[in-house]
Amino acid sequence: MSFIPYGRQSISQADIKAVTDVLESDFLTQGPAVPIFENMLAEICNAAAACATNSATSALHIACLALGVGKGDVVWTSPISFVSSANCARLCGADVDFVDVDPDTTNICVEALELKLQVAFSLGKIPKVLIAVHMGGRSCEMEKIFNLCSRYNVRIIEDASHATGGLAYDEPVGSCKYSDLCVFSFHPVKIVTTGEGGAIVGNDENMVSRCKLLRSHGVTRDLSQMEGEPDGDWYYEQITLGLNYRMTDLQAALGASQIKSLGDFICRRRALADLYRDELSDVPLDLPPCDDHIKSAWHLFVVQTGDSTGNERGELFRHLRSAEIGVNVHYKPIHTQPYYMRLGFSEGQYPSAEVYYRKALSLPIHPALSDDQLTYIVTKVKDFYR
């Protein structure tokens, strides 16, 4: 059996043609492909507008900037995520804090959030923004989070890097019904890919326009935004400090083609998750929750061992890797990363996140994974527990 990665891209001939068409066109970047992709993304999310970027990390950064995050502010997020979910606030000069996770869903624990907000209010240290991470593709309980944050005027960014195509209470992830902005990732292992790439969606078109300004040096050609009188069609103005976080037309064309296959990708991921759940039901592992009201995009299929020391997970990891199965671990809690420990965080602060980390193992799941490969993975897992 050749090596089975935990995730990988699925590229069709239509995807290849979409990219080569751009290569043969007049625009490799700043052309028509980006707004086409943005419009498609906004449409599938039931959102008003979208801003495509060169990565989800960049998208998180400018989403924070668009919401006014800066020095003296505090941003809260989940300790179980990739470090970008916290770094984006640090890049704005803000402080970061974390809300512990629900042990079952590994998303922000609503009860922990409520308690932390009450304490923060009593201390006069309410966060400016909460970044709610949809871990593994499963949406957070956004309505409950929104209701809590609304009491304290906390703005919300959804980090949906894992959750393109997910549903929550029949609403697509990205509808921003209970958030200000939502960020997606299009890395090759994600649900759809642009190679590298990300995007912000939202229902406040002025805010999304602000994001577009920030992603391109703070430069505008929009007469309504200019402070001076244009001298000709060439004229532009820099009206704020921005960055170069633009997505190329090559990336956007691939993304637009991939979105056409989103339904098929999600259908296959859900079928694989169902197979795992059936085949592993008699194995002493905790399987990810599955229910009717929140339908995961299944970017990850994370199982948890019964041993919270990390020893069993480590042995299972090595056993499966020796069988050419590319299991992985998502993620080492952010607050235990050396950079964040130098900021004053320490082990023991977010116990549910830390226990999860010692138990968690991501099994391969992606549309190209065959039923035979899944059967092989399950067999090797069962061999370990015999």
Image (cartoon, rainbow, N blue to C red):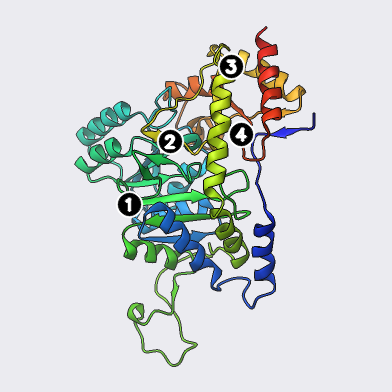
Q: CA distance from mark 1 to mark 2?
A: 22 Å
Residue designated by label 3? 310
Where does label 1 land, which residue?
Answer: 180
Label 2 Cα crowd, 10 Å radius (few <14 / some 14-19 / many 20+):
many
Mark 1 vs 3, N-terminal side: 1
Q: Splitting the image into 4 quarters, where does residue 328 fall?
A: top right
Name the residue at 34% across, 35% down: 141
The residue positioned 72% from the left and 18% from the top of the image is 319
In front: label 3 or label 4 = 4
Sequence-wise first label, 4 or 2: 2
Dot 1 amino acid type: Asp
Relative to 166, is 38 above or below? below
Q: Residue 62: in sight, yes or no?
A: no
Q: Please state which of the two labelled residues, at mark 1 or mark 3, is closer to the viewer.
A: 1
Name the amino acid type tagged 3.
Gly
Disc 2 marks which amino acid? Lys
The residue under label 2 is 295
